[in-house]
Image (cartoon, rainbow, N blue to C red):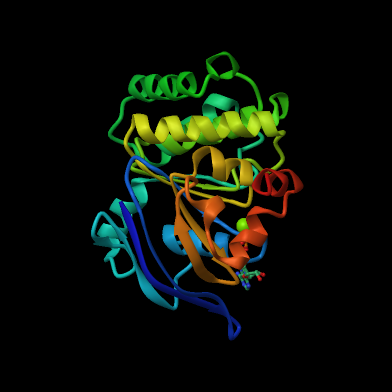
């Protein structure tokens, strides 16, 4: 479980996050949603420690990450897996070398054969065992995301973060990636936080949803309740799609 409490962040005097609080539970796919430019990625970066919030706290299973000493920070960082926007694979490394990378950096206690086994297990889990020797330039966009997911879980992460995991993917591949993220979350009982502006993802995997508008949390709930929510900004976001408007109006 991750708790965020009263997060504020300004850049050059402009408030980008205003008093954002919430709880992301273990074993659930937690979504941070909202329009572009509204502060989702900045919030995610505050949570994982890539940006220091001006005030507020981020608690990983009651361990205060924002005020942690060096050792605790390192401990928590090792438990975090991240799927970056665009995949962020090393172009000059094969698929399996990309997945191996965190182990090479962070797992000196593991033997070579343990690492190889772990990489193979993770590639199998995301359905890529056949592509282990290929280069990123030789695989599709959806496969690149799978590599990113395998790399994010290779360290046995307790926390998984994904920033716009569907960017650049067609709708069907997007749903497959969403479902894979949800399956992994439940299978390994980890805490997953996904940033997205994709309504398909919201309806598909939104077990907890935090809606951000201009740096503020205006609504939280689940995909079951989002269609009935009474928040204008959220409605504008959800029903910007003609199909959903027609469904709503019956
Ligand atoms: N490092 C930064 N310095 C200054 N402004 C930033 C920085 N990062 C993000 N911003 C601004 O914060 C706002 C929110 O950005 P972001 O969180 O990336 O939006 P999104 O919801 O699309 O992910 C934007 O106006 C963006 O320009
Ligand atoms: Mg973003």
Residue sitting farthest toward the bottom: 13
- Taking the spot 28% from the left edge, 34% from the top edge, the residue there is 109
- Taking the spot 49% from the left edge, 63% from the top edge, the residue there is 219
Regarding ligand 2, which quadrant of the image does it lie in? Answer: bottom right
**Quadrant in which residue 247 is drawn:** top right
Q: Quadrant of the C terminus?
A: top right
Total residue callouts: 0
Residue sitting farthest toward the top: 130
Give coordinates of residue 58: x percent, y percent: 35, 64
Residue sitting farthest toward the right: 242
Residue sitting farthest toward the front: 250
Give coordinates of residue 88: x percent, y percent: 61, 43
Give coordinates of residue 62: x percent, y percent: 23, 59
- 54 or 151, nearer to the observer: 54
Left or right of 84? Residue 22 is: left
Q: As displayed, is residue 104 above or below residue 43?
A: above
């Amino acid at each position: 479980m991750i708790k965020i409490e009263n997060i504020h962040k300004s850049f050059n005097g402009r408030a980008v996050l205003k008093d954002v609080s919430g709880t992301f539970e273990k074993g659930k796919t937690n979504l941070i949603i909202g329009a572009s430019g509204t502060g989702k990625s900045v919030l995610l970066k505050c949570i994982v420690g890539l940006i220091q919030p001006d005030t507020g706290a981020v608690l990983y299973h009651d361990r205060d990450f924002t005020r942690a000493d060096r050792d605790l920070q390192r401990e928590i960082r090792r438990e975090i897996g991240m799927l970056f926007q665009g995949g962020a694979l090393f172009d000059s490394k094969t698929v399996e070398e990309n997945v191996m990378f965190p182990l090479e950096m962070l797992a000196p206690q593991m033997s070579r054969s343990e690492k190889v086994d772990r990489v193979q297990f993770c590639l199998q889990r995301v359905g890529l065992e056949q592509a282990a020797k290929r280069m990123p330039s030789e695989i599709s966009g959806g496969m690149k995301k799978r590599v990113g997911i395998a790399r994010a879980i290779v360290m046995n992460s307790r926390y998984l973060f994904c920033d716009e995991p569907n960017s650049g993917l067609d709708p069907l591949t997007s749903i497959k990636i969403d479902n894979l993220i949800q399956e992994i979350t439940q299978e390994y009982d980890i805490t997953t936080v996904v940033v997205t502006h994709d309504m398909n993802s919201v309806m598909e995997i939104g077990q907890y949803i935090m809606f951000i508008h201009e740096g503020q949390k205006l609504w939280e709930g689940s995909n079951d309740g989002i269609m009935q929510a009474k928040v204008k900004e959220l409605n504008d976001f959800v029903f910007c799609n003609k199909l959903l408007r027609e469904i709503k109006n019956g």
